[in-house]
Each structure stands twice: as C-alpha cells, then as structure tokens.
Image (spheres, rainbow, N blue to C red):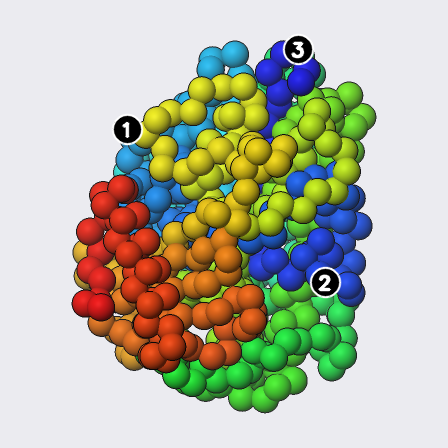
Amino acid sequence: MARRPPNILLFISDQQRTDTMSCYGNDWIHSPNLDALAAGAYVFDNSYCSQAVCTAARGSLMTGLHPHSHGCVVNNIGLRRDTQTIAEMLPHGYRKAHFGKWHLGDDAFCQHGFDEWISVEDDRRPRYTRQDAPFSDLRHWLVEQGHTPTTRIGGTDEFHFGHTQRATLPAEHQMGAFVAAHAERFIRDNPDDPWLLVFSTFEPHPPYSGPYNGMYDPQSLPVGPAFLRYPEGHSQFNRSRADFYPTDRVDGQQLDEELGWRRLRAQYFANVKIIDDAVGRVQRALDESGQADRTLFAFTSDHGEMAGDHGMLEKRVFYEESARVPLLLRVPWLSDDAQRVCGVCSHVDLAPTLLDLAGQPVPSTLPGRSLAGALTGADDLRRHDAFIEWNGDSPDLPDRNLGSAAINAASARPWRSVVTGDRWKLNLSASDDCELFDLANDPHELTNLFTDPAHDQRVHLLAAKIRQWQLDTGDSAPLPQM
C-alpha cells in the first residue's frame, strides 16, 4: 500500500440495477467508462441494498448500519446528529467532501463530519430543521446557465430532478455532470493529503427520459422472462403494484401497451450514459493528477429499478431488479485486473470494508463485516448472508402516494428478507403472502416456493437466520408464525 493513507472515492448512483453494466452480463449497453473501471476492479456478483428506497439505503451507505438502527426507515427522515457517518469515523488527517444527493435531512448544510459540501436538491426545503436554508448549489448554477426552475415547492420555484423538467436539460447540465465538475476540482486541488470524496448523483433515477433518449431502439431492446410477467402467487404488495401500472401513464408513455413499457425501459437504460460520462471525468482527474494508484474507488447504487419486470416500476421490493445493486471496488495496490467476487454481501459491509482497506479501525458497533478478506481469498462470501428490510410506513412516518389505496395499504406492512450465499431468498411478512425463491435455478424469481411442502425445512432454516439477525441487531419487526 502507499506510504500515506489512501484516498477513498465512493461513487453512488441512484436507482441503477445491475444489468445496466457490461460486467454484470449486459452485452449491448454503451458504457466505456464503467467498463474500464470494472476492468481494473473487484466485481461483486451479488451485492444487496439494506432497503430498496433512497433515504434508508443511503443511511446505510453512510453509516454502515441497518435502517432500523440508523433510524431512516422511510424517505424524508433525517439522520440523527449522534449517528456517525464514515466521514466521522475517519481521522482528522483526511479531507472529507460530500458532493451531490444527500437525502438524509437538511440537504443544503454541510454536516456529519464533512469539510466540503455541494448541495443539489431543494424539494425537501419545507422539511428542513433550519429556517435559514440557502438554495442548492445546483439551483444557482442552473440559473447561471440560463435555465428557469418551473416546479413550485414550498412557495418557491425549484428544479425538481424527479420531475420531467430534468429530461429537458442537455447532458452537460445534468446533475451527474455538475457533481463531476466539482469532483474534478476537488481531486486536482487535493494532491497531497488523503481525502474522502462521496460522489452522489441522481441518475438514472426517473423521470424515465433524458438527454440520451433514442440511444437504444425500444423494439429490439433485450428483455428477460420477467418482463411484464404478472407475479402470480407472489405477495399481495407485488400483485397490487402489477395491477396498477397498466392503468398509469408515466413520462408520456401509456403502460397498457408493450411498446410504451419498452420506450420507458430504453430511456431508463439510456440515462446510465450520464453516470458513465461522470465516471470517465472522475477517472481522468485521478489519472492526470497522479492519484489513481493511491485511490480506493468504490462504485455502487442505492437500489435498483424494476423497469417493467414483474409488471412494475420503481423499487421498494425484494426482487433482484430492485434490491440487488452493482458493487465495484478498485484497489490498485491489491490488483489492477478484473476480479470476480462470488457469494453475497450487503451495503452495511461497505463502510467497514473502506475503513479496513484504508488501514483504519472499524468500529465494533457496525453490524457488517469487512470484505477485504474476500479480495485476497481469505474469506468466502458464499458462506455469507445478506439481510434486507422494508419498514412500511404509517401516518407518523408517511411515504408518498404510491398510486392506489391497495398499494399504499400493502406498503405499510413491514418485511424482512435474507439472501444466502448459496442463492436462496426468503421474504417474510406477518401480514402478507411470504415468498421463497431459488435464485440458482430461478434467477428471474418467477416461481414462489414458499408453500411448497418440499421446502418446509429450508423455510424454517432461513426464517431462523432472520430471527437470529433480529436478535443480533435489535430489530423488532413482526415475523409470521412458522
């Protein structure tokens, strides 16, 4: 390892499923910069988010804790001031910057151990704990570029990046490009002391439209066997969502016809080009400043996107498209070649891993494990389990309207899931139809085996794993009687 502590670059995309990348089997997507990163990185075959929604997942990425421990169990909850982030776990010798989407409360303000802060969102201003909140850095910049905010939020006009206005901006004015410019500046301005840079952007999160529309032909776009396949025999939550979407119109696409779904899906995949552009700019800054060989580069996403699989959109569910996320680790002092890491891991493992690889102590309070041993062959993640949560919502902790009364009611029910290294997934809810999937033989999760008597023993074994994890981590979500 380099004499000084290494730099740490944590790049977080938003709502990016694994099959948007060549290293996860996509042989048609145009992503040369992500391909180049993967060619020199450890590629984790099966990495899972802690909970498939933005705030909860990002809370885990920042803290190394499960959502029920860090407290951000649904969107729009701020991270507690006394909950440490990775920035607060690193020593003072590090320069620490967070550029981009925060989504953990008071987004405009530098906080939680970071020294530098570039803000990008204004739509949560009405929920800030401070009344003196400035507009985001991105808003000011977009106005300077000649754009006019058109979304009314909290009495002021804003740029809402979850709104179709984002799709009208050119590629060079997307959030990813804005954050990349600041990341380039930060990297070049800090050639000597070690640094932590969290690069967090919004793409390819909806709207399902953007500056690269037309990159892929909807008619010839490859799809898998789960595309528009109704989740018969699966949970009520999943069935209620699949029932809803054909009645909806999303970003100009009517979803009662296959072509509308295909257009939406093609445009979603095209938005990955914004991420690829940003990765290329960051990597060039590392190379040109001479810091690439002493920088630990981690790439992941907060959660995935259904994009029409099982007949639904967005996230919030345990299906692979929603809960499984890309995870690349470039550790140049260990390897410059592409390496596959089999087995499973979780977002709660990422903070311990980054600290460990940087030669820093890992707090004993973190429930995850360092993945450093898996890089050298000392640890086998095929013996590892990953746990995923859905904490539902309530009048005190509301999510947004998800489209129908049936979906909202089903969404309120908590769930717990385990994914094992030998590729089984058990999803449990005390008030819904549970699910068991054999991912090795049914990777698209078409057949729910939960009620199959041949798998009773496996269901009990995996349920015991979830109960033990609950005891170990202080989780009190109800589980069904087995």
Of the pair 362 and 114, the residue shown nearer to us: 362
**Which residue is found at the position 35% from the left and 44% from the top?**
66
The residue singled out by tag 3 in the image is 3
Of the image marks 1 and 2, the number of the one nearer the N terminus: 2
Of the image marks 2 and 3, the number of the one nearer the N terminus: 3
Q: Residues within 10 Å of mark 1 (few under 14, many from 20)?
A: few
Helix, strand or loop under label 1 = loop
Left or right: where 312 falls relative to 210: left
The residue singled out by tag 2 in the image is 26
Eye-nearest disc, 1 or 3: 3
Q: In which quadrant of the rendered image does the N terminus lie? A: top right
Eye-nearest disc, 1 or 2: 2
Left or right: where 232 falls relative to 96: left
* Up/down of 332 relative to 461, above or below: above
Badge 3 amino acid: Arg
* Up/down of 430 relative to 349, above or below: below
Helix, strand or loop under label 2 = loop
Badge 2 amino acid: Asn
Spot occupied by residue 221 in the image (x, y as percentages of width and height)? 73, 75
Badge 1 amino acid: Asp
**Which residue is found at the position 69% from the left and 28% from the top?**
334
Of the pair 383 and 54, the residue shown nearer to us: 383
Spot occupied by residue 207 in the image (x, y as percentages of width and height)? 56, 64
Instruction: State which quadrant residue 394 falls in.
Output: bottom left
The residue singled out by tag 1 in the image is 82
- CA gap, disc 2 and disc 3: 38 Å
